[in-house]
Amino acid sequence: MTEGIRHSARREPGWLRRAVSCDHKVIGIQYALTALLMLFVAFCMVLMMRWQLAYPESPFPFLSNFFGEDDTRMPKGVMLPNFYNQLGAMHGTYMVFLAVVPLLVGGFGTYLVPLMLGAPNLAFPRLSRVGYLCYLAGIVIISFSFITPAGPSNSGWTGYPPLSVIETGGQTYWLVGIAFVYLSSLFLAINLITSIVQLRAPGLSLLRLPFFVWSQLVTSYLLLLAFPPLAAAAVLQLMDRLEGTSFFLPSGLVVTGKPLDASGGGSALLWQHLFWFLAHPEVYVLILPAFGIIAEVIANNTRKPLWGYKGMVVSAVFMGFMSMLVWAHHMFLTGMGTVISTFFQATTLIISIPSIIMATSLLVSLWGGSIRFTVPMLFALAFLPMFGIGGLTGLPLALSATNIVLHDTYYVIGHFHYVVAPGTLFAIFAGVYYWFPKVTGRKLNDTLGHLHFWPSLLFMNAIFIPMLLQGLAGVSRRLYDGGATYGFGQEVFFLNKAATHSAFALAIAQLPFVINFVYSLRWGKKSADNPWDATSLEWNTPSPPRFGGNFDKPPRAHRGPNEYSVPGKAKDFSPQWEPEEA
């Protein structure tokens, strides 16, 4: 009894000890909540940009009295061109580096992977804590640039030189912040790879892993291998900015009519190669964990094993390898030779094959299933056509002939956002609704979930379809005034207002989710340990799993991850942890 009392005391630490602990569940929740906050900030930025595009020279609602007439960014609430560029740069930075990737890998990955492996924690718990602190430091440094006199970076989320070298001090904060985010990603990747390889429960062979774990494994390798070139490039650009070197400054550069003394011998294209060597694999860092979430939700709600599980695994691994061989399709306009151009056109088309295989496998998995239209399943089902639109609209950009015409138009914005917004974000929402009972021990409200899903699906499309149409009409993506002073494409600029109104409607559509999330944390209906009748090992823990450990006794895997509706079984699900019947 004494031992039991001591054990119980160890399991009930105070809130401060929990907050600074190295428990993977605590750190995963911290990653998720911080990333959700960054997602909110990035969305607020885009609302301000959309207002400017629809109503140029008009004060943003409620801000006209907040900013004075002498303000250098939004005098009397009217956005100036430079601040529009700064918001564009920060929106992309927050969404990609500070929100979606940390949420998918740091949040979902850190919390769920050890549970799915049957492990008590990640392989390196302290490294996990340091990784989160590096992520937090990156957020603080990048965000601090907003309160500096010159403001944040205005050279885009891509940081292209020479503008990024000669522009205001905000770029320095951007580069240092990205270096800390790199360290966070590096520690995350090392931790997840080691844990998946070394900490699997007995009987949990590689081909018994849930597809979610496979997606996190491939994603971690991408972060490990593709991020170092950008980290090195960030150091070189810092040297150009602070020490007068010329890694990215070409000879003969003239700025405001005067030759730049520091320039000479550098190459702006070198930055593009180093940046896109990370940034295109980063797209698959967004997509692969999303596929992992969708696979778990679809298998559970069709009550069927995933169709083509092994093919999906091979496709994910192949996609990860090929993603590092396609970066230069972002650079067809740089004048690369036809041989190199042809190579990257071919690799870009080839990499569409594994994504098609995975999407087709998920689609075919629906056939003959006893589908439960739960809220997470609705988001999962919507993911498939939204990702399909994102993928199909990317094919013209894979070919240099059409890419040159569409490059830097709103078509590119529409294509990328179809992959990231209604694609990846719908997967994130599916994951939140699906695993919320496991994390909190309470269920989210279904009615509020439906009020969140249906308007979100409608307004997501109402935002991005106009962008595709504007891009096909040749409208540049870099018009701060929505084309008011642009003679070309006037017949499609009315779509700016349609997209802007839809963006504000989408913001309102998120209120049911916020209310649902906050309300259910305290007053939501209590959940059973396995409310979805799921089969993977995380559902063998209490809801929520106890602090300082996960399982009452070490689990053993007896079968694959998605054994649903097995003929001859009394139940329509066979959990991995239950022994085979004699």
Image (tube, rainbow, N blue to C red):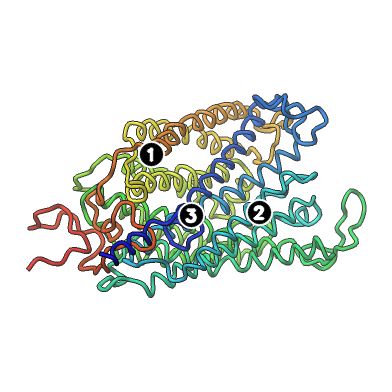
Residue type, label 3: Leu
Residue flagged by tag 1: what amino acid is it? Arg
The outermost residue toward the front is 2
Q: Judging from the image, what secondary structure is the residue with disc 2 in? A: loop
Asked whether residue 328 is in view, the answer is: no
SS under mark 1: helix
Crowding at dot 1, Cα within 10 Å, few <14 / some 14-19 / many 20+, comes out as few
**Which class describes the residues within 10 Å of circle 3: few (<14), some (14-19), or many (20+)?**
many
Tell me, for residue 522, which label it has, or none: 1
C-alpha span from label 3 to label 2: 17 Å
Horizontal and vertical percent position of residue 331: 64, 58
Q: Residue at x 21, y 66 (%)?
A: 559
What label does residue 178 carry, if any?
none
Q: Which residue is mark 2?
A: 158
User: Disc 3 vs disc 2: Cβ atoms closer than 8 Å?
Assistant: no
| Residue type at the position of mark 2 | Thr
- The CA span between labels 1 and 2 is 41 Å
Give the mark nearer the N terminus: 1 vs 2.
Answer: 2
Count of labels in the image:
3
Q: Residue drawn 31% across and 54% down?
A: 296
Q: Earlier in the sequence, mark 3 or mark 2?
A: 2
Q: Report x, y in % for residue 53.
A: 65, 31
**In this rendering, position of residue 314 left or right of residue 174:** left
Name the spot of residue 185 as percent of width and height, x first.
Answer: 54, 63
